[in-house]
Amino acid sequence: MAGESRNWVLMVTAQTPTNIAVIKYWGKRDENLILPINDSISVTLDPNHLCTTTTVAVSPSFKQDRMWLNRKEISLSGGRYQNCLREIRNRACDVEDKKKGIKILKEDWGKLHLHIASYNNFPTAAGLASSAAGFACLVFALAKLMNLKEDQSQLSAIARQGSGSACRSLYGGFVKWIMGKEENGSDSLAVQLTDEKQWDDLVIVIAVVSSRQKETSSTSGMRESVKTSLLLQHRAKEIVPKRILQMEEAIKNCDFTSFAQLTCADSNQFHAVCMDSCPPIFYMNDTSHRIINIAEKWNRSEETPQVAYTFDAGPNAVLIARNRQTAALLIQRLLYYFPPNSDDLNSYVIGDKSILQDAGLTGMKDVEGLPPPPETKDNIPSQKYKGDVSHFICTRPGRGPVLLADESLALLDSENGLPK
Amino acid sequence: MAGESRNWVLMVTAQTPTNIAVIKYWGKRDENLILPINDSISVTLDPNHLCTTTTVAVSPSFKQDRMWLNRKEISLSGGRYQNCLREIRNRACDVEDKKKGIKILKEDWGKLHLHIASYNNFPTAAGLASSAAGFACLVFALAKLMNLKEDQSQLSAIARQGSGSACRSLYGGFVKWIMGKEENGSDSLAVQLTDEKQWDDLVIVIAVVSSRQKETSSTSGMRESVKTSLLLQHRAKEIVPKRILQMEEAIKNCDFTSFAQLTCADSNQFHAVCMDSCPPIFYMNDTSHRIINIAEKWNRSEETPQVAYTFDAGPNAVLIARNRQTAALLIQRLLYYFPPNSDDLNSYVIGDKSILQDAGLTGMKDVEGLPPPPETKDNIPSQKYKGDVSHFICTRPGRGPVLLADESLALLDSENGLPK
């Protein structure tokens, strides 16, 4: 290890997307290595709207590994962080920064400490896959810093050991996590099915649902399901393998009808397995059910799916619209049933606001003037559920991890390696 | 057929209980004969609190078959009524009432018309198995009127053709509906496992949950599940047969721990299968989920189940307490979380009110003074859900159908055969 002084800091900043599974991961066959009981498929969400930014730094002046998440220092002692750090250090290579006159040899990495700062541009632990984006970004950034020679798939197998679904955030577009067969987990990794440009008319609307319930974490929830659900093994062994093939075909052909049917059915089956666990796990609430009913009624009235829905381990709905036109019709329906509590439409629908404009919704007057959706016309005036949705995020499928070269975007100070 | 005049009316009045399945019936293999895809087991509820009373009458003066349900005339043209009436008429025998000087020969029944009046002492179609009690009572009363020689099991196979679960209301105590193998359904009938006196310390509390949702009928719901759920066949073929054996064992041994585990697991699995249907069916709502969570938390804190829960095709909870002591503790918990909207405790907890007294709850002051259940003590003050439960019904396992000899209890006038 060579540098002009012990005070140099070498840094890398990366940005990594979150992802949402359309064929669900639920159940581990190995709790420590995080090996799943079935393959899963996800769509990566546009990092412009939902992403984690992570700066990793190394310096001979650092006394210990430290990490700050959303500006608050957190412990790195957990097994999941330790597994990722160990796996990456084991693969570290020589690094040279000629401009700064820094050279770190492969064997030096074991003696050097790291500072890590991570920031989510969306609420952490609100059921928006923050740990997936977080671990993917940590692994990706450290791999760059330490000059790992592994490809994205091999990195995904490291990220997997931090949070299973994190492995799917190493790619953009549609991604498959192959469960693998090896006991050591070396073949349990992510591969890209198609990049985000292949099927670029999809629009995604996330309904962040207000909830006062304390939720079961997905880690403990899936452990309970594996232990107690009599339906889970049947799902993993008999149903998912076929669905994976069908979903790959649907994605390859940009076949929205098949994609939507598989996505909705698999989300519902995942929640069915949760309910079949003992004690039963309820992630969806009445608002989630209402959103499903709105989507199902609309899809049926159009005879072909306009929107797919999927729910992870929480009440938030992720709605995937066929294209921009249907996304506009979708947001009209959503705002009709779930008008904002306040008059601030601007903070109620965030992300890609152009969908609002397409829908002709530029202010609260437009929202109040929305007619009931035509598919409800024979019914009694439909009830509205003001306040049941916290806000909506409009986004789309997006790209995989990127490095942020602009040092001004780093979360750590380049002089002292502490949070800015 | 002989009588002093054409104006005689011959009547029979019967009372039949409702039942709640503890191993669920969900899915038909024959829609017309109502043949199920698995065995089911139920407990019959005390007819003092929930029952149907039906008067059936025959008279040469009646011009057509007519029926009144809860004092309102309804059509008998539906296939289910027609199937029951045909099957019973086919088995009718000679009837003689010497006192009245009436003699009806076997072959006369085809020419005579019937009047039927039925009354539920609980809200119809509130998810409280009114059609089960109703068809059981219709078949039982007609069988008595027409002097059928068939035993209760054989009658249950007729009631089954009116409403599947009706076959289980022909007996008190615990009842098994054997799915049978015959194509004509002749061996798909109910048998009594134990009568209501065998396990007589159970107490049942029904939470009638307020709901504004229009629900999927169980008939169309189970049709959708059979068509679309990939988990249903696995449940019916692989899981239920083992559970039936375990449940029979638990009932035989009055083994509450095993009984409660099986009851809760099977209710949850039935709702899981509903959710796995396409479109998904949600019968439980947030209030149902809260009641489950209250029961599960309490059971876990006691290490052995105090209460079992089960939900049919609606949000109402049927809670089965181990004995009177635990029932008192249960009603305390329920009233703590779900206090009445009004001050009228007397109309909020109906049925066997002695449970309220055991619980020391004689007025609203006592309800307001209820401390949080001890199992919540480490938590932040628990939320209350006033208005989310419409009312509670306290009851117990009960007897099967009975004849009501007292003519003053008949629902039809003995002179003209019309509703009183």
Image (cartoon, coloured by chain):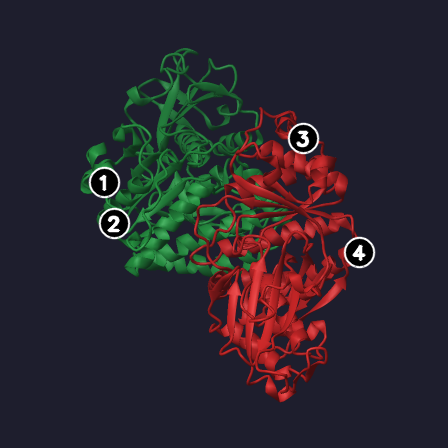
Chain colours: A red, B green
Residue under label 3, please give it.
A375
Q: Which residue is mark 1?
A: B355
Residue B326 numbered mark, or none? 2
> Is the C terminus of chain B in the top left, top right, bottom left or bottom right quadrant?
top left
Whether labels 3 and 2 share one chain: no
CB atoms of marks 3 and 2 within 8 Å = no
Image quadrant in which the N terminus of chain B is located: top left
Kindly report the distance in space between the C-alpha atoms of the residues bearing marks 4 and 1. 66 Å
Query: Mark 4 against mark 1, which lies toward the viewer?
Result: 4
Whether residue B250 is visible, yes or no, is: yes
Subunit ID for the residue under disc 2? B
SS at mark 3?
Answer: helix
Q: Nearer the viewer, residue A181 or A417?
A: A417
User: Which label lies toward us, 3 or 2?
Assistant: 3
Label 3: how many Cα within 10 Å (few below 14, some 14–19, many 20+): some
- Secondary structure beneath label 2: helix
Amino acid type assigned to the residue bearing label 2 in the image: Thr
Q: Give me the residue at 40% from left, 56% from top.
A: B262
Tell me the residue at 44%/12% (across/down): B6
Task: Say which chain tag 4 marks.
Answer: A
Q: Position of residue A237 (x, y in %)?
A: 61, 66
Type of the residue with mark 3: Glu
Residue B152 appears in the rendering: no
Q: Residues within 10 Å of mark 4 (few under 14, many from 20)?
A: few
Image quadrant of residue A235?
bottom right
Instruction: Tell me where residue B7 appears, x and y as whole percent.
Output: 41, 11
Q: Mark 4 highlights which residue?
A: A197
> How far apart, in angstroms, are the residues tagged by discs 1 and 3?
48 Å
Task: Check disc 1 and give the amino acid type.
Answer: Ile
The numbered disc on residue A262 is: none
Badge 4 amino acid: Lys
